[in-house]
Image (cartoon, rainbow, N blue to C red):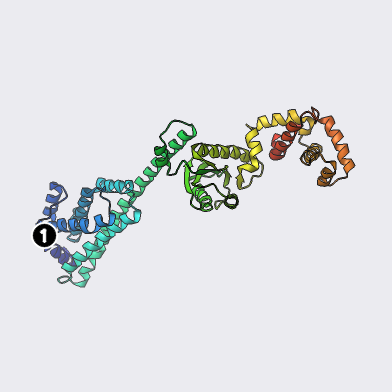
């Protein structure tokens, strides 16, 4: 036996009649017949009318997107209103809208309809229908019965919004993944110098190829890319006004980024880029030299990759590294093993990983970088000039080839040994 309030609500639902009986149903004949059997012809016609009005006055004007599936939205409005009336009237009637919700969500995501527009339009429909129901029921229903109306409408609309939003977010994520994969493929085609139409590249990547490009490689050892590294990439973009930011996920730990704009970064802007402190702890970033055009897009990225390889092999790298500061090892070194071979063959005993060899390397490097000045070398090493003379004699004895014959090669080996440290030095105990 129904409670009086429920009986009153059911009677009010049964009494609903449309103001315009000419509105045509959007739902199929079978669904309308089932609804009519449960509710009666008058309430069904009222739902058909106000489903159409919601479509015309709320959904379409707010979305302003003619590409949206109008018929699917129309069916949804109608079905939701019928479900609201059925619940209020105590009837078990609930049209299956799973596929329709999915269609609407997919279309909204594909057309780029903002998330808040989707939710707001559904809430506006809810408000419109609630106002109409209360206007018709308030004169005849007691307060305790009337209170159930907004609760029921809200409950049904909350459920619908949850389903639509879930489908919308899932579809948007799928589309984002698809766009990211497409961008990644386009970037790789450009880097591989494959023939590809310039306009398509610019559409896919969202930048102008003729601009100046600054490549950045970001990674976080042991951490995922995604939003974390994208946040850091955005920090760099903030330091270069007017630049377009492109990011591409390279692998599980690495993000590639480009900053593109019509003019090359000035000295002050470059300093601002290199002084970025990543907001995500543990992030490393390497900045390639800016260069123009399609070739510049490739070159700055490849130079950043070379520099990243050097930084990853450095014992204690900085958070942000400018390619220019590691250009020598980036250009010379293919891998650490070959670097070690080069250092050992060029420096001989001076490539040992011990204190005496380290002292000799520091002295020789200072000697070469001060223009072979004994006085300046002694000042830099904080020793007497005669000590430098003695050390240089000993160094000449230890070097595999005379310094005068292989000065450039020896200087390079010393710089590499200084940069990479113990990882490229000879350890006798390991033999």
Q: Which residue is mark 1?
A: 20
Q: Position of residue 264 (x, y in %)?
A: 54, 46
Above/below status of 153 relative to 255: below
- The quarter holding residue 64 reads bottom left
Q: Position of residue 80 (x, y in %)?
A: 22, 55
Q: Is residue 287 left or right of residue 354?
A: left
Mark 1 lies on a secondary structure that is loop
**Along the viewing direction, whichever of 88 and 239 lies nearer the viewer:** 239
Q: Position of residue 321 (x, y in %)?
A: 61, 45
- The quarter holding residue 401 reads top right
At a point 66% along the width and 29% down the height, the residue shown is 338
**Along the viewing direction, whichever of 398 and 88 lies nearer the viewer:** 398
Can residue 96 be seen in the rendering of this structure?
no
At a point 48% along the width and 47% down the height, the residue shown is 245
Q: Residues within 10 Å of mark 1 (few under 14, many from 20)?
A: few
Q: Position of residue 68 (x, y in %)?
A: 26, 48
The N terminus, quarter of image: bottom left
**Along the viewing direction, whichever of 312 and 131 lies nearer the viewer:** 312
Q: Is residue 377 left or right of residue 47?
A: right
């Amino acid at each position: 036996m129904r409670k009086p309030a429920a009986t009153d609500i059911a009677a009010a639902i049964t009494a609903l009649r449309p103001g315009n009986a000419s509105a045509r149903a959007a739902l199929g004949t079978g669904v309308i017949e089932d609804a009519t059997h449960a509710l009666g012809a008058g309430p069904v016609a009222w739902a058909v009318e106000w489903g159409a009005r919601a479509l015309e006055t709320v959904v379409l004007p707010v979305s302003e997107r003619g590409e949206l599936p109008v018929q699917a939205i129309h069916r949804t409005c109608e079905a939701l209103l019928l479900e609201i009336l059925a619940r209020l009237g105590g009837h078990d009637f609930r049209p299956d809208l799973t596929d329709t919700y999915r269609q609407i969500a997919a279309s909204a995501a594909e057309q780029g309809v903002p998330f808040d527009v989707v939710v707001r339009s559904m809430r506006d429909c809810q408000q419109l229908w609630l106002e109409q129901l209360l206007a018709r029921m308030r004169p005849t229903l007691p307060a305790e019965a009337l209170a159930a109306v907004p609760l029921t409408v809200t409950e049904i609309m909350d459920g619908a919004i949850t389903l639509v939003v879930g489908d919308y977010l899932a579809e948007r994520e799928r589309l984002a993944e698809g766009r990211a994969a497409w961008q990644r493929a386009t970037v790789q085609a450009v880097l591989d110098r494959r023939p590809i139409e310039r306009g398509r590249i610019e559409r896919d990547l969202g930048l102008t190829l003729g601009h100046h490009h600054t490549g950045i490689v970001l990674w976080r050892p042991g951490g995922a890319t995604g939003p974390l590294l994208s946040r850091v990439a955005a920090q760099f973009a903030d330091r270069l006004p007017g630049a377009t930011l492109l990011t591409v996920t390279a692998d599980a730990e690495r993000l590639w980024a480009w900053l593109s704009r019509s003019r090359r970064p000035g000295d002050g802007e470059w300093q601002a880029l290199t002084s970025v402190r990543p907001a995500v702890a543990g992030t490393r970033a390497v900045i390639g030299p800016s260069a123009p055009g399609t070739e510049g897009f490739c070159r700055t990225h490849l130079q950043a990759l070379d520099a990243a390889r050097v930084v990853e092999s450095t014992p204690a790298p900085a958070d942000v590294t400018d390619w220019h500061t590691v250009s020598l090892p980036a250009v010379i070194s293919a891998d650490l093993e070959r670097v070690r071979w080069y250092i050992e063959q060029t420096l001989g005993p001076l490539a040992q990983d011990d204190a005496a060899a380290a002292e000799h390397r520091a002295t020789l490097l200072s000697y070469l970088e001060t223009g072979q000045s004994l006085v300046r070398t002694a000042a830099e090493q904080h020793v007497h000039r005669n000590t430098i003379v003695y050390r240089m004699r000993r160094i000449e004895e230890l070097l595999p080839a005379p310094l005068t014959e292989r000065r450039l090669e020896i200087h390079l080996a010393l710089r590499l040994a200084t940069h990479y440290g113990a990882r490229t030095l000879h350890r006798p105990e390991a033999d």
